[in-house]
Image (tube, rainbow, N blue to C red):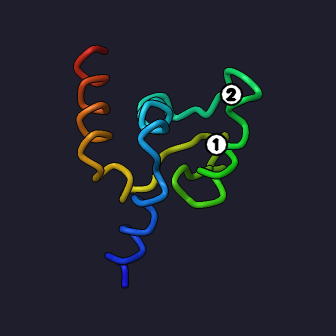
Amino acid sequence: MVQRRGDAIRGRVSDYAFDRVTRVAHEKRLILTSEDERPMVETMLSNNVVLRYLSGSEWYDIHPAVREIPAVAQAIEALGRAK
């Protein structure tokens, strides 16, 4: 059941959202750069692709299943090396 849930969450991440989820994973922030992004961001939050945390201060991260998407994992690794 856990595997199916992870598959379902991974299936909700469109190719065009890889850059966005990678930035969230790296920066731990979720910032709209334009109003055009709002529907995509709201969808990612409502589908648990991006998770909102309120421990101390508000911060964001991506669901662990999303980290397993090869293109996302590679992009996160590349951002870490560029740091």
Camera-near label (2 vs 1) is 1
Residue sitting at the far bottom: 1
Residue 4 in which image quadrant: bottom left
Residue 79 in which image quadrant: top left
The image shows residue 42 at horizontal and vertical percentages of: 69, 48
Q: Is residue 55 above or below residue 80?
A: below
Q: What amino acid does circle 2 point to?
A: Leu
Which of these two is toward me, 31 or 83?
Answer: 31
Look at 29% across and 31% down and name the residue there: 75
Which callout, 2 or 1, points at the residue further toward the start of the chain? Answer: 2
Look at 56% across and 59% down and name the residue there: 48
Q: Is residue 45 left or right of residue 22?
A: right
Numbered badge on residue 40: 1
Residue 22 in which image quadrant: top left
Look at 58% across and 32% down and name the residue there: 29
Q: Is residue 38 above or below residue 6?
A: above
The image shows residue 50 at horizontal and vertical percentages of: 54, 49
Instruction: Specify the quadrant that holds the C terminus.
Output: top left
Instruction: Specify the quadrant that holds the N terminus.
Output: bottom left
Q: What amino acid does circle 1 point to?
A: Met
Look at 27% across and 14% down and name the residue there: 82
The image shows residue 3 at horizontal and vertical percentages of: 32, 76
Residue with the mark numbered 2: 32
Quote the CA–CA distance across marks 2 and 1. Answer: 10 Å
In the structure shown, which secondary structural element does the residue marked by tag 1 occupy?
A: helix
- Structural crowding at the residue carrying mark 1, measured as other residues with C-alpha within 10 Å and reported as few (<14), some (14–19) or many (≥20): some
Which of these two is toward me, 72 or 81?
Answer: 72
- Structural crowding at the residue carrying mark 2, measured as other residues with C-alpha within 10 Å and reported as few (<14), some (14–19) or many (≥20): few
Q: Is residue 18 left or right of residue 80?
A: right
